[in-house]
Image (tube, rainbow, N blue to C red):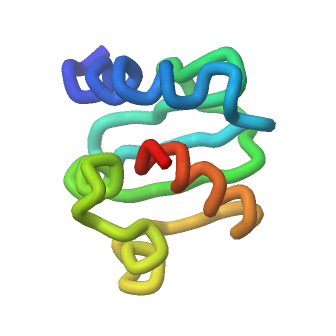
């Protein structure tokens, strides 16, 4: 596992554990995939209720609060597959709100 993916898992695990309903998948372009559910965040690739795809830079900016996830989606920096409502809930978790 790359250091980048390990870092994402370390940041996201406490944010999603016991909070996220259903499953979400983050695809970090050129790096790999992180799966998230109520049990936490982990390396993997499988079926998910919502999939978000972006570069590492975009995801980091969203998690740090310098990039609005809705604006990232509207500008094409963030791609979505699945329910937009679920994506909004996942983005709230990513931003730590």
* Position of residue 61 measured from the top left corner of the image (x, y, whole percent): 24, 56
Q: In percent of the image, x 54 and y 53: which residue is there?
A: 92
Residue 11, given in percent of the width and then of the height, sits at 36, 26
- In this orientation, which residue lies closer to the viewer: 54 or 93? 93
Compared to residue 81, the image places residue 49 above or below, namely above
Q: Hey, which quadrant is residue 30 in on the image?
A: top left
Q: Measured along the vertical axis of the image, is residue 83 above or below residue 33?
A: below
Farthest-out residue, front = 97
Q: Residue at x 48, y 75 (%)?
A: 70
**How far across and down, in percent of the image, does residue 69 sit?**
43, 67
User: Residue 20's x, y, as percent?
Assistant: 69, 35
- Residue 24: which quarter of the image? top right
| Quadrant occupied by the N terminus | top left
Q: At x 31% / y 18%, what residue is drawn? A: 6
Examine the rendered structure and indicate whether residue 36 appears above or below residue 63: above
Kindly identify the residue that appears in the image at 46 percent across and 35 percent down.
Answer: 33
Q: In the depicted view, which residue is nearer to us: 75 or 27?
A: 75
Q: Is residue 80 left or right of residue 46?
A: left
Which residue is most to the bottom? 75
Left or right of 50? Residue 27 is left
Q: Would you say 5 lies left or right of 40 here?
A: left
């Amino acid at each position: 596992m790359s250091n980048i993916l390990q870092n994402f898992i370390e940041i996201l695990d406490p944010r999603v554990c016991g909070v996220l309903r259903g499953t979400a998948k983050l695809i970090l372009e050129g790096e790999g995939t992180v799966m998230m559910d109520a049990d936490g965040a982990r390396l993997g690739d499988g079926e998910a209720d919502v999939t978000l795809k972006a570069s590492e830079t975009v995801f980091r900016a969203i998690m740090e609060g310098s990039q609005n996830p809705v604006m990232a989606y509207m500008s094409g920096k963030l791609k979505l597959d699945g329910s937009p409502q679920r994506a909004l809930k996942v983005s709230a978790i990513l931003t730590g709100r």
